[in-house]
Image (cartoon, helix red, strand yellow):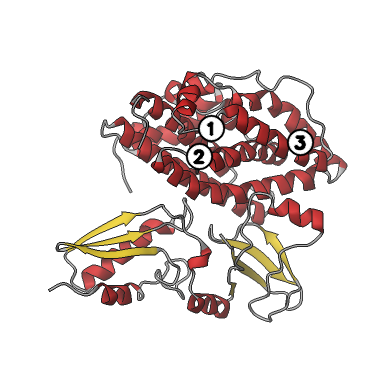
Amino acid sequence: MVTPTQEIWDWLAEVPDPEIPVVSVTELGIIREVAWDGDTLKVAITPTYSGCPATSVIDLMVEEKLREKGVQNIALERRLSPPWTTDWVTQSARDKLRDYGIAPPIDGTASDGRMGRAARMSGTNLTVPCPRCASNHTEKVSQFGSTPCKAAYVCRDCLEPFDYFKCH
Amino acid sequence: MVALDLDRQTLFDWLLRLGDNALILGHRTSEWCGHGPVLEEDIALANTALDLIGHCQMWYTLAAEIEGKARTADNLAYLRDAIQFKNVKLVELPNGDMGQTIMREFLFDAFHFELLTALTGSTDPKVAEIAAKAVKEVAYQLDRSSDLVVRLGDGTEESHRRMQAALDYLWPYVGEMFVADATDDALAEAGIAPRLAEIQTKWEAIVTDTLEEATLTRPDRRPDVHTGGKQGRHTEHLGYILAEMQFLQRAYPGAEW
């Protein structure tokens, strides 16, 4: 008797992202497939960023969770295609990120390699609302933050520095 | 599927070029970790290095699979000598100052971005898959490096002077990225990779626009003076990088932690 895959998705929803523990790996959209192949459970996981050090930790945590639930044979697959996008980050995760102090991704603003130039030429910049006071009077401090998926911002009204989960 | 008339060795050599460029530039970029002029730049460079090392791992894994000799990505990174590395000389040059580091990132990022964009349409699905993953990150890197080239080039008198000096110094190395040899030709014939001349045209457009906005002067000299890296002929600098990077695996073979 194999466990229905829906139940396995529910188990995986209990696995937190190791860097941003308020969101789960399923909410981040990195679990791409759960399927039985005979008595082996196959789980396809896609990395967020190629060099993200959390990738191997996530594999380990997923495996631990499945073992804890009694799954004997596990085959984890690292799936690259289609590449991960923040479009897959669920609404629930976006709300949790904001409550946690991280501005969620603003869809449709991913860099095409010339975003900075386009912004400079038009004199506008991407407006990222402050997750604490909701002010639009914020400023980018650095294109990168504490993890590869984030950029560093500061709010000019409440003066709080904060992370922005980049649109990718 | 990979075109059958392309031999394994040629494909392997070409994949090493992609992986080696990413690893060596990633290693150079990581040298700034803990030494950045400000904390934010330090973090940004460390993250850029991570992206590049992630790309290298994907290319090496595919290369090892194509080679079929049971080597791993780690074997390729840690157990080859300088002559077996196929990166362009541009990426192995020492970092110099922050201006030279940023200028090098920009000149390479523009090439890397256009090459990976073209590779997303490769006839080899595995190559296309890796390129599609990597290009999203490289687009962001190009965004950052081109922005900094403009800010520093069109900045203070001192930052302008340093950026122009960096451009003048690096210029004779940039041509190697576009000099096609038999390997590049074979890959283009098979539809796996684009013609480098096409990439050069796109690179020129980005570089010309950015340098103009940065008020920097394009050097009036040949860009293809220092070549040979892609064939394994390197500057003396690569040996020092490998000595540092490979020491542990050479001294304690198979060590893991």
Q: Earlier in the sequence, mark 2 or mark 1?
A: 2
Please tell me if label 3 and label 2 are on a single chain: yes
In the rendering, at what x and y percent does residue B18 appear? Answer: 48, 34
Q: Is residue B11 above or below residue B23?
A: above
Q: Which residue is mark 3?
A: B208
Residue A141 lies left or right of residue B45; in this view the side is right
Does residue A50 appear in this view? Answer: yes
Q: Which residue is mark 1?
A: B194
| Few, some or many residues within 10 Å of mark 2 (<14, 14–19, 20+) | many
Q: Could you tell me how far apart the alpha carbons at marks 3 and 2 are, in whole angstroms?
A: 23 Å
Q: Is residue A88 above or below residue B76?
A: below
Residue B51 lies left or right of residue B210; in this view the side is left
| Few, some or many residues within 10 Å of mark 1 (<14, 14–19, 20+) | many
Q: Nearer the viewer, residue B241 or B150?
A: B150
The N terminus of chain B appears in which quarter of the rendering? top left
Mark 1 and mark 2 in contact (Cβ < 8 Å)?
yes
- Callout 1: chain: B
Please tell me if label 2 and label 1 are on a single chain: yes
Q: Which residue is mark 2?
A: B119
Query: Which marked residue is nearer to the observer: mark 3 or mark 1?
Result: 1
The quadrant where residue B82 appears: top left
Q: Earlier in the sequence, mark 3 or mark 1?
A: 1
Label 3 sits on a secondary structure element that is helix
At label 1, the amino acid type is Pro
Q: Residue furthest right?
A: B157
Which residue does the image show at 43% across and 37% down from the upper left? B123
In the rendering, at what x and y percent does residue B31 appear? Answer: 56, 41
In the rendering, at what x and y percent does residue A3 appear? Answer: 19, 74
Please tell me if label 3 and label 1 are on a single chain: yes
Label 2 sits on a secondary structure element that is helix
Q: Could you tell me how far apart the alpha carbons at marks 2 and 1 are, in whole angstroms?
A: 7 Å
